[in-house]
């Protein structure tokens, strides 16, 4: 007899994800996702890859990010709306799915808003471990919004950062970040400008939300040996670095076809040299060459990172007994008779109504 594969789905809601992170521990989640990202990047050629599909408007962007290997297909739905704080909404909101390639059945549906913050910070730290100087202990954090705490903790735990210099055009955001990181083992200084924050820093992380061709970092701010973790420039027409910064650096990207459209290197000519980071992890290309080299990780976020994060969260949820069964697909006695579920439902509702009426009469 053929085994029947009814497509039940494990659903991990936002409240359940919060419980998962609290029980597992945020640092453990960041480290676990970082390890999973490294494992999946080392399987780079096993994946069917494509740039994300984006729908842009005057106020933001909505994107779908698909990827698959021979066993699992994953996608993330994510938006980016810098003005959302005016509506009481996050700038970034997301959810994602893992599905079986052999059947197409969705097996795991999860929130990805909190998870995206975790995986973005994890990816930043994975890159910095290969591209920043090993003795890096200070980081300038430019842009102190919803992603900033996660970046700080990832760099503390996985890279060894102990000193933070903070700057945001919104002073309240910097005050929020400093308060949230109080007691977390950092020496923190709130600065009055980007230039003040980056002066003498080993690593500079830019994670701003403004959807413009901005020049948060200019060439005069860059010092020998710096590693720049450019996170905020993640769609066409949105950048954070002056092109002169890229000219004087070795630049690393996630998936070059996507980064050419959305990353900092969208400013550069088509023959501008950029190295896909998987080649560094796999030992095919060098990372940092010497202590004086300037390196840039032009991070736009790639679907393989979400694949890794979804896989980690699914395994962790199962281990902790979290999540609920969600019937996304109708169960049919005959897979070729979809119409039959409507007749079956009608009979079921009639029987339920009759039972309820009888119970009411007895009462």
Image (cartoon, helix red, strand yellow):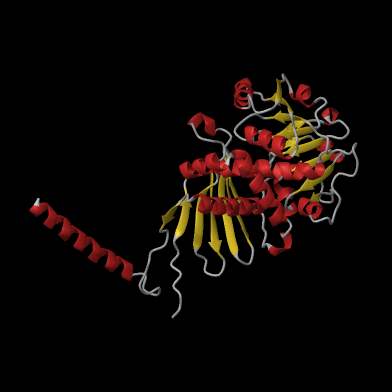
| Position of the N terminus by quadrant | bottom left
Q: Is residue 115 visible?
A: yes
Spot occupied by residue 215 in the image (x, y as percentages of width and height): 75, 32
For this view, does 231 lie left or right of residue 101? right
Depth order, front residue of 128/213: 128
Instruction: Tell me the quarter of the picture where residue 246 sits.
Output: top right
Q: Is residue 57 visible?
A: no
For this view, does 196 lie left or right of residue 4? right
Residue for point 64% across, 48% down: 33
Residue for point 28% across, 64% down: 345
Spot occupied by residue 74 in the image (x, y as percentages of width and height): 58, 57
Spot occupied by residue 225 in the image (x, y as percentages of width and height): 87, 35
Residue for point 46% across, 52% down: 11
Instruction: Tell me the quarter of the picture where residue 57 sits.
Output: top right
In the rendered image of this protein, does residue 98 appear above or below residue 63?
below
Depth order, front residue of 242/42: 42
Spot occupied by residue 344 in the image (x, y as percentages of width and height): 28, 68
Name, please, the residue furthest toward the bottom: 1
Count of numbered labels shown in the rendering? 0
Depth order, front residue of 226/261: 226
For this view, does 105 lie left or right of residue 242? left
Instruction: Tell me the quarter of the picture where residue 29 sits.
Output: top right
């Amino acid at each position: 007899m053929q085994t029947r594969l009814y497509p039940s789905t494990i659903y991990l809601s936002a409240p359940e994800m919060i419980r998962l992170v609290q029980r597992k521990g945020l640092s453990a989640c960041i480290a676990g996702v970082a390890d999973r990202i490294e494992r999946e990047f080392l399987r780079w050629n096993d994946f069917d890859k494509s740039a994300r599909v984006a729908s842009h408007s005057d106020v933001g962007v909505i994107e779908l990010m698909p990827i698959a290997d021979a066993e699992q297909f994953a996608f993330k739905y994510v938006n980016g709306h810098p003005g959302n704080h005016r509506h009481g909404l996050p700038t970034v909101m997301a959810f994602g799915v893992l599905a079986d390639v052999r059947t197409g059945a969705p097996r795991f549906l999860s929130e990805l808003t909190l998870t995206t913050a975790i995986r973005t910070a994890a990816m930043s730290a994975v890159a910095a471990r290969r591209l920043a100087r090993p003795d890096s202990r200070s980081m300038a954090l430019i842009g102190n919004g919803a992603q900033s705490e996660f970046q700080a903790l990832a760099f503390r735990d996985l890279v060894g950062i102990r000193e933070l210099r903070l700057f945001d055009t919104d002073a309240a955001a910097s005050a929020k970040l400093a308060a949230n990181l109080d007691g977390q083992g950092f020496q923190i200084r709130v600065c009055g400008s980007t230039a003040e924050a980056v002066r003498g820093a080993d690593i500079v992380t830019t994670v701003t939300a403004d959807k413009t061709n901005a020049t948060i970092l200019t060439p005069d701010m860059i010092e020998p040996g710096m590693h720049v973790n450019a996170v905020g420039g993640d769609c066409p027409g949105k950048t954070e670095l002056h092109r002169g910064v890229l000219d004087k650096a070795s630049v690393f990207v996630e998936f070059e076809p996507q980064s050419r459209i959305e990353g900092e290197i969208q400013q550069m000519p088509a023959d501008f040299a950029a190295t896909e980071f998987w080649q560094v992890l796999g030992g095919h290309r060098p990372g940092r060459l010497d202590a004086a080299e300037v390196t840039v990780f032009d991070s736009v976020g790639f679907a393989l990172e979400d694949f890794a994060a979804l896989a980690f969260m699914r395994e962790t949820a199962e281990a902790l007994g979290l999540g609920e069964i969600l019937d996304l697909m109708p169960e049919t006695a005959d897979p070729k008779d979809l119409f039959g579920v409507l007749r079956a439902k009608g009979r079921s509702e009639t029987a339920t109504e009759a039972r309820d009426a009888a119970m009411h009469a007895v009462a």
